[in-house]
Amino acid sequence: MYTITGATGNIGSKITKILLDKGGKVKVIARTAANLKKFVDRGAEAAAGDAEDSKFLTNAFIGAEAIFTMIPPNYQANDFRAYQNRFSASIAAAIKNSGVTYVVNLSSQGADMPEGTGPIKGLHDQEQRLNKLEDVNIIHLRCAYFMENLLMNIPLIKNSGIMGSAIMGDLKFPMIATKDIAAVAADYLIKHNFSNKSIRDLLGQRGVSLNEAATVIGKKIGKPDLKYVQFPYDQAEKGLLQAGLSPDVSRLFVEMSKAFNEGLIKFQRRTPENTTPTSLEEFADFFVQVYKSS
């Protein structure tokens, strides 16, 4: 039995599909049962409830040979760091009380830094909390910037004809498709080929700037002159608020952008082991589908 937290999200849903395709027995966790129906229809077991409740989560973890853990985003949280800590503490308690011995945990590049990284700081804290668990094998997947984050630009493209954020347009950094993260996570869940507490960096296919991303995406969607614009921090924060993020989450995202721009987040050196196959050009084909349907 494999148990998946965040089963309805970009990564958890893909992990679940991979495991079910391979004939695995899977338990999927979400707040409501209705969101899990598509997996139940394929033979998965549903555990619907509040994952911040460690008793619920413990029961969901019992009997699992391996679990995938993550802190799902809550962009409306009034205190995002408090939310992250509650969720992380619930996960740690459930692992300890359920007897699970293999854990694949979603983390991020920059999680080595204790401060100044916005929402990534919560993943640093989660790594530290989980690493204190005894007799549990845990691998932290420190992933690069999700290519799927680029989808947040669709309203801006349609309304203003540009892409934009507070990150510098010419700054190159690694981007990864979530399907590549899911493939690695599923492989670890199946093989249990990790021990003690370890880290796996996942850096995508190559380093990409947001200027380049705009060029690639613009060509794909029929807007070859599409440009990326770097917004001042205060303007970027206002834009996030208008998009529906809470004031605290908006502030933290701007802090993360500063960490990118100022080099506080230092990405690992690229190797064959941390490079994944999906290119930005391939992801852009998916971007087009979402763009046309939105």
Image (tube, helix red, strand yellow):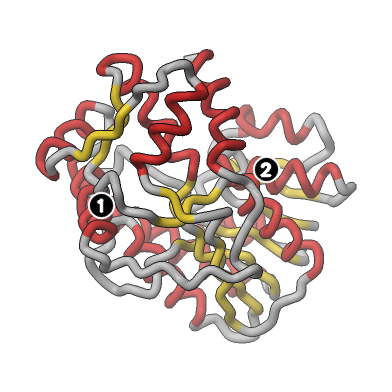
On the rendered image, what quadrant is the N terminus found in? bottom right
Which residue is at a point 56% across and 62% down the rendered structure image? 202
Instruction: Verify CB contact (< 8 Å) between mark 2 and mark 1.
Output: no
Q: Secondary structure at mark 2?
A: helix
Q: Which residue is mark 1?
A: 257
Q: Is residue 8 above or below residue 146?
A: above
Q: Is residue 17 above or below residue 163?
A: below
Q: Is residue 66 left or right of residue 178?
A: right
Where is residue 12? Give x, y as percent.
Answer: 62, 46
Q: Which residue is mark 2?
A: 14
**Whole-Å distance between the Cαs marked 2 and 1?**
27 Å
Where is residue 27? Give x, y as percent.
Answer: 73, 49
Q: Is residue 50 left or right of residue 122?
A: right
Residue 168: tell me if it is visible. yes
Which residue is at a point 36% across and 69% down the rendered structure image? 266
Which residue is at a point 77% across and 71% down the rendered structure image? 192
Nearer the observer, 27 or 16 = 16
Where is residue 60? Give x, y as percent.
Answer: 66, 55
Which residue is at a point 69% across and 48% down the rendered structure image? 15
Asked which quadrant contains residue 35, the reply is top right
